[in-house]
Image (cartoon, grey):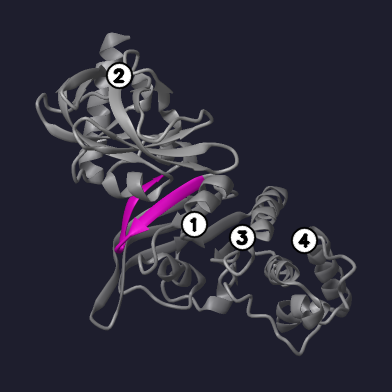
Amino acid sequence: MAILKFAGVKKGFGDTEILKDISFEIEEGKFYTILGPSGSGKTTILRLIAGFDQPDGGAIYFDGKQINDLPANKRQVNTVFQDYALFPNLNVFENVAFGLRLQRMKKRAIQLRAQEALALVHLGGYAHRELDELSGGQQQRVAIARAIANRPKVLLLDEALSALDHKLRKEMQTELRQLQRQLGITFIFVTHDQEEALAMSDQIMIINEGYIEQSGTPVDIYDEPLNHFVADFIGESNIIPATMVKDFVVEINGKQFTCVDAGITPGEAVEVVLRPEDLDITTVESGKLAATVDSQLFRGVDYQIMVHDRDGHEWKINSIHKTTVGKEIGITFDPEDIHVMRKGESQAAFNARLASYQEVDHDQA
């Protein structure tokens, strides 16, 4: 069931158009991430949901009711900001209780609700601490406790982990995911960190220059990017020019390979995506392509190996096996590792091709 819906929403500031006819639905009880580069419109979407800004066009629905003009304090939404926005003159308990006091709740109810929220973020014994006695991670937990104490239907998190160091950030990713599952409320998390989005989300929306490029599960987006931007933005990718020979056959560097894509015009120029971890190193004789090793970097769990093939295309390989710089090697991969993309393909064009592929698959079944 959709708890939140954007229908043709537009938003600009001055002469700059930030969101360009955005439409999507958010289901209740899931962890969503809005992912994109700086300036793409991520935070603008969050501010529109929270009621801090109003759309210039289109409609926003919450629980089936239009909320374009509904004030922020009337929405069942709370926000955790990048800088936490805590009150330095208040202790931990008073920060968490602040919103509850504004609702004029009874003292005993405030006490119970604030203690419950602090316990959920593992700060049960910190109620009377001052903020300057807390670490960055603990302050972030206070901000989350303050937000969930109001029992919102939707919790918005705007780059909420960006101020933390790498180790603490990893820990908080796990804690946030567990908290969302425990509470069962909808989380909408904004980040520009692809790894963070893949690790935490049920659904990801990738936004770029005011448009939604792709939405889906982390696995769908990683394994089946719709276009060059998504393939290049999510994870590490080898994006190589190719030609579609026919359904389930693509030509790379003059050689034909079996793939799992269909519905593209024979002879059409396309791009193929092969993830570095899907490529295996073998002998030149056994390989599907031959390449020369340019560099090798040990990263603890694997080697990042840069090579160039005989047509001059660069490839990145992530392998647990060491090789030698300057050596000619073979590269091999499986048909399902090849993902074919139309150049500059739109969402509408992809949907049409997907329908065509499903028809072909059904006919073969």
Label 3, label 2: how far apart the Cα atoms are: 52 Å
CB-based contact (under 8 Å), mark 4 and mark 2? no
Of the residues shown, which amino acid type is indicated by label 4?
Answer: Val
Residue beneath disc 3: 153
Please name which of the two marks, 4 or 2, marks the residue nearer to the observer: 2
Of the residues shown, which amino acid type is indicated by label 3?
Answer: Lys
Residue beneath disc 2: 288
CB-based contact (under 8 Å), mark 3 and mark 2? no
Label 2, label 1: how far apart the Cα atoms are: 34 Å
Label 1, label 3: how far apart the Cα atoms are: 25 Å
86 relative to 298 in the view: left or right: right
Residue beneath the point at 44% across and 61% down? 61
Along the viewing direction, whichever of 262 and 292 lies nearer the viewer: 292
Residue beneath the point at 20% across and 43% down? 345
Q: Tag 1 or tag 4, which sits nearer the N-term?
A: 4
Residue beneath disc 4: 121
Q: Tag 2 or tag 4, which sits nearer the N-term?
A: 4
